[in-house]
Every structure is written in C-alpha cells, then in structure tokens.
Amino acid sequence: MSEVSGMSELDSMSELDNMSEFKMTPELQFEIEQWYYREARLLDGRQYQQWLRLMSEQISYSMPSRINTQVNNRDRGKEEMISVDRELERAQDMTGCPLREENFAFLMMRVDRAYKMNSWAENPPARTRRIIGNVEVLEQASDQLKVISNFHLFYARPGTRDFLYSGQRRDTLQKVGEGYKVLSREIVMDYGAIDYPTMGLLF
Amino acid sequence: MTKKLKDIVSDDASLIAREAWTDEHIYDLEKKGIFGKTWLFLGHESQIKNPGDFVQAYMGETPIILARGGDEKVYANINSCSHRGVPVCRSDHGNAKRFVCPYHSWSYTVEGELVTIPQERELKSCPDKSKLGLKAVPRLESWKGFYFGSFDTDIESLDDFLGDMKFYLGAFIDRFKGGVEFIGAPHRWTIDANWKLPVENQLGDVNHGPFLHSSIIPAEAAEEINEFGFSVVTNPGHGATFRLMPEDAHPGMMAWGMESPVALMAEPEVHQYLFETQDKAVERVGDIRSRMKGLTYGVYPNFSFLWSNASFKVSHPRGPGKVEYWSWSVVPADAPEEVKKTLRANYSCFFGPGGILEQEDSEAWSQQFLGSNIDYVDDRPYFYGLGLGEEKSHPDLPGQVDVCANEHYAREFFKRWRSDLESVEEQP
C-alpha cells in the first residue's frame, strides 16, 4: 500500500479481492471498533484537545463536495453508472472544489477556536451525539490500516433547529505505539442539499 | 403589508424597518421589481469552455441553464419543459447534446430549440416546434467572461450597469494574464436567513470582521483596515472595500493571496507565483490598482466577491426567511496546478459551508432573521446611519468614498431597493 491517501473505497475494495495475506481477526475488529468509540466519545464530550492527539501531524483531512452529475451513456447497465464516487469533487482532483481540505495545523486552529469565548457560531456549544457503525477494515499493510466506518451525528444547539449529519469516513490509521493515529480521513457526506448550519464540525 | 415602502426605508435610508427582511408581500415585490428585471450573474466562461458544456444557474427562484451552443455562442434558457414544466436538466454541470425531459421525452438542443416530440408521429397534425423551445432569457451579456442575464428586454447594457465597478473588479481579474477560472460546481447551502443580509455582508460590511470573527482574525488585520481602508460606492447597490497600500509597502503586504495562513504555510512555489503576480500588477492594472488589497465587493442585487480568499458568491432568494447561497473558489487560470490547489484550500478552509469564518456569518444571518421577526418592535427600525453623508469623491478612486465604518454601501443599496420595489408597488 504505497499510495494510502488517494484511494477510494471502491478502488480498495477491488484490490481487496486479490489480497490473500490479509486476515481479519475478531481481536483486530474489536480493537479498531473500540478505538472509534473512544474517538466519538472524545468529540461528543467536547474534549477536542485529546481528540487532536489521535490525529497524525501529517494528516490529510478532506470532505468532498457532492454534486449531481450527468449519467454517462456508455456506463448504462453497469454499477459505475451510479457509483457514489462519480458524485464527489475530491481533494486529489482539480476538477472541482471539495468542501474541506485541511492539514494538522488547520485542525489545530479549529480545536483552538472551540475554547475561545468569541466563537459565536458555537456559543453556546452544540450538543452532539455520534453513533459509529459498520466499521470495516479493508486493508492492512505494514503499520497502516485502511478502515471505513459510517456515522450518524445528531446536532442540537439552542436557538436553532436540530440536525442529523450522516456520512462515511474513509480513514487510513497508522499504528503508533499501542494505539493508532489518523493519517488520512476523507468524509463522504450524505446530503441532497446542504441544509446544515456548518459543515465545519470535527467529523 | 400595511406600510408603504417609504415607511420601510427612510428617504436617506438611515432607518430600515424589520419587515424589509420578513414580509411576504415585500418578497413578492422583490421578485417582480428586482429579480424579474435587473442583471443577474449566471456563470463564467471558464465553466463552459466547449460546445455542449452547461452549468445550472438561478435568476431568483427560476432555474436557468447556461450553455455553450454548437456555434460556440452562449445561451441561457429556463430549465422547464414547454410541455408540462418538468426540468429538462438535472445535473449541476456537464456536457450535453440534448436536454431530454424525463416525463414525455420532449428533447431540446443545448441552444434551447425543441427538436423531438415523440408523440407527434402518432398524430395527424404536428405542433410548430419552432414556437415551443425552452424560454430564452431575453437579455444575455458578458463582461470579461462573466455572463449576466436579465428578464427585462429594455434594460441598459451590462457594461453601463456595471459602470465604475469594472474599475474595481478589473483590479482583481486583470491581475492575471489568463484571467480567472471558476473551479467545479458551486458550494450551495441553504441558510435560514433573508437573501439581503449575505449581500449586505459582502457588499461593504467589513465592520463586523474584528468582532464576529475575533476568534480567528488577528487584531492587526483590523488595524490595517483602519489605517488604509476605503469603502466605495460606485453606483447605488454596487460597492467595494479594500486597503490602498502605501507606495513603499513591501510586496508581501500587497500581494493577493499572501495574507492567508494557508498560503503562508505553502510551498515556495506558491509564494513565488503570488509575488511574481504582484510584480507585474503595475503593468497590468496600473499603479493605484496594483496597490489595492481588496476586502469585499458587491454587484447589485446579489453577486458578491471576496478578495482575500478569492470567492465569488450569489445569494439566491428562497422566500423571505431562506436563502440558497452559492459560492465558487476562483483561481488565476494560468497558475500552476499546485498553486491552484493551495488557493482552493485558502477558500474552503475559511469560507463556504465548511469554512471556519463563514460559519459565524451564517449564524449571525440566521439570528438576524429571528430578530427581524419578533413582535412589539415595529417602532424600532434598524439604524443604518453610521457615517451618514460623510462620503465624498476621491481623486484616484471612482465613486463615493469614505472609511470602512461608513455604512453608505448599505444605504445606497436600500435606496435602490426601495426605488425598484416602488416601481412595481401599485401593480396588482
């Protein structure tokens, strides 16, 4: 796995078919799921400084923009015709504009902002609850794991409507000591129209 | 609505009633008097380079297809089938030979002509297809690749409409040899706010920056604005704010793009490009404009530009209390790929639906709408009088000019707004 950040879920799934060495174990599944539950607990508990320590300083953190594309006539009858990835304007392409493409320094800025008195859009702060599911380890190579997971994030803040964010995270985790850090994260949001106060949360 | 427009906006526009943001009847007048008449931004030529290329746009709430025809000309048509009104185009952008209505398969060329009615071969009489094309936007003109449409056949030329705003828009666009490029589909998000507040915010309201955005924007930025900042109104509803840097200012203090942390952290290649662009600015846009370091821009009624993070925006109305806000990342067309990528992130990190700055704005806009809707404050119109009458002319800068704290940009907008609404006020 040389190029870890640029591969989509579908690319890696097709590669997975050819990978015989990678054996999933209940222990690894348990370990990774527990890791994600802890991450969600830190975020819902507004413990963003601790959360940031789970991010690699080399992280690439992005959220593609999701667009309505034309169907390609040649793809009629094939799964590619309506593949999710066709709808994404991603950080690695220059044909579109992702909603977010950030590095560690920028995540740090978001975390710092959360603890300032004058971050008005989150004052008072939102009450959130993340449910993480469908945790699937797709690949393992040396010290890295490619993992996808789904989330529902409930978001409530005084003075506005409640919102439900739904999406998938496509992560590369790096083994560091006894734990893991996120080396790359791509967040594929499920929305028809962006009817949310912000897409700038820590997902 | 019980009030007359002259009671909604005072003659000098220093007092504006809350109903201006919330009243359904006023919203109807806006549709008739503004969105049904004036020039509205539709798209940029970089989005439709080849024959068959199209993008979606809106004029108010009316969906538009902007497309390059087989003859290389640009066409703007309403995205609604002549048969039963169903949209004939569902993609944000793409390349098409035909737009086909899904309901009965009437099909149209990208230029908007009706070419196929599948049902007609079963019938004795064939309808006259030449009369059943998509409805064309009656006026379509462009300036430096920016396409605008209007439903008013008698409207002044786009060139006249933009007037002296061309001087300020050109200060950005003409800095780059190859002009600018819009990247991808616009970010579009709905906000529970009235369309005019994002407009006002981008038209000249730098005054909220050091306060609403104090968690991110450093205090020095405000000092620079206080020292070198200007607010200009070229025509009512059009405006620009910027810093005019002194002649001896270091190029790093003037170069577009360099005031962003994203650019500061970027590779040397990015800095080199931005400095080279600044070096050539005098020859491309002249001395005064080369020293301009823009802030906010607005073109009446709902087209905006943000200089520092290079984003064009349109505030599409969706009723008094809802806006569909569109924004594009815009980069110099001739910049190397890595430079474009950095500049794109410079936009999305701070602006757009995921931006760390704009989340405060959209929150303030929503809260303003709630505040405009409360009861028992009819006798307390909003105060728009800061700097009333203090604007004046300037030897080098076209338009009426003053410090950024002067709210003349908003007063002039609302004077034009009132006049546009009065022109349709008495109609049934």
Image (cartoon, coloured by chain):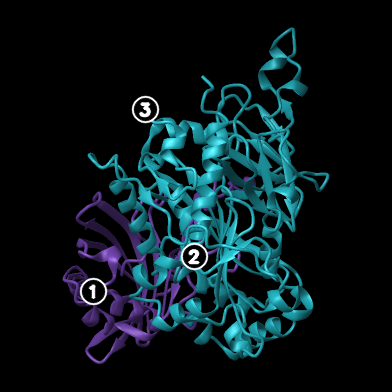
Chain colours: A purple, B cyan
Residue B298 visible in image = yes
Relative side of B130 to A45, left or right? right
Q: Are marks 3 and 1 in contact (CB under 8 Å)?
A: no
**Residue with the mark numbered 3:** B2
Relative side of B192 to B133, left or right? left
Question: Taking B360 as reference, is B301 above or below it?
Answer: above
Crowdedness near tag 2: few (<14), some (14–19) or many (≥20) residues, C-alpha within 10 Å? many
Residue B192 visible in image = no
Relative side of B56 to B284, left or right? left
Find residue A77 and report its horizontal and vertical position in percent. 55, 44
In this view, the residue farthest toward the top is B124
Which amino acid is tagged 1? Met
Residue found at x 25% / y 49%: A161
Q: Secondary structure at mark 3?
A: loop
Crowdedness near tag 1: few (<14), some (14–19) or many (≥20) residues, C-alpha within 10 Å? few
- Nearest to the eye among marks 3 and 1: give it: 3
Q: Chain of mark 1?
A: A
Estimate the spatial distance between the alpha carbons at disc 3 and disc 2, rounded to whole Å: 46 Å
Q: Nearer the viewer, residue A8 or B101?
A: B101
In this view, the residue farthest toward the right is B71
Residue found at x 19% / y 68%: A44
Find residue A119 and report its horizontal and vertical position in percent. 29, 70
Q: Earlier in the sequence, mark 1 or mark 2?
A: 2
Estimate the spatial distance between the alpha carbons at disc 1 and disc 2, rounded to whole Å: 29 Å
Q: Chain of mark 2?
A: A
Q: Chain of mark 3?
A: B
Which amino acid is tagged 2? Pro
**Residue with the mark numbered 2:** A98
Question: Taking B65 as reference, is A54 above or below it?
Answer: below
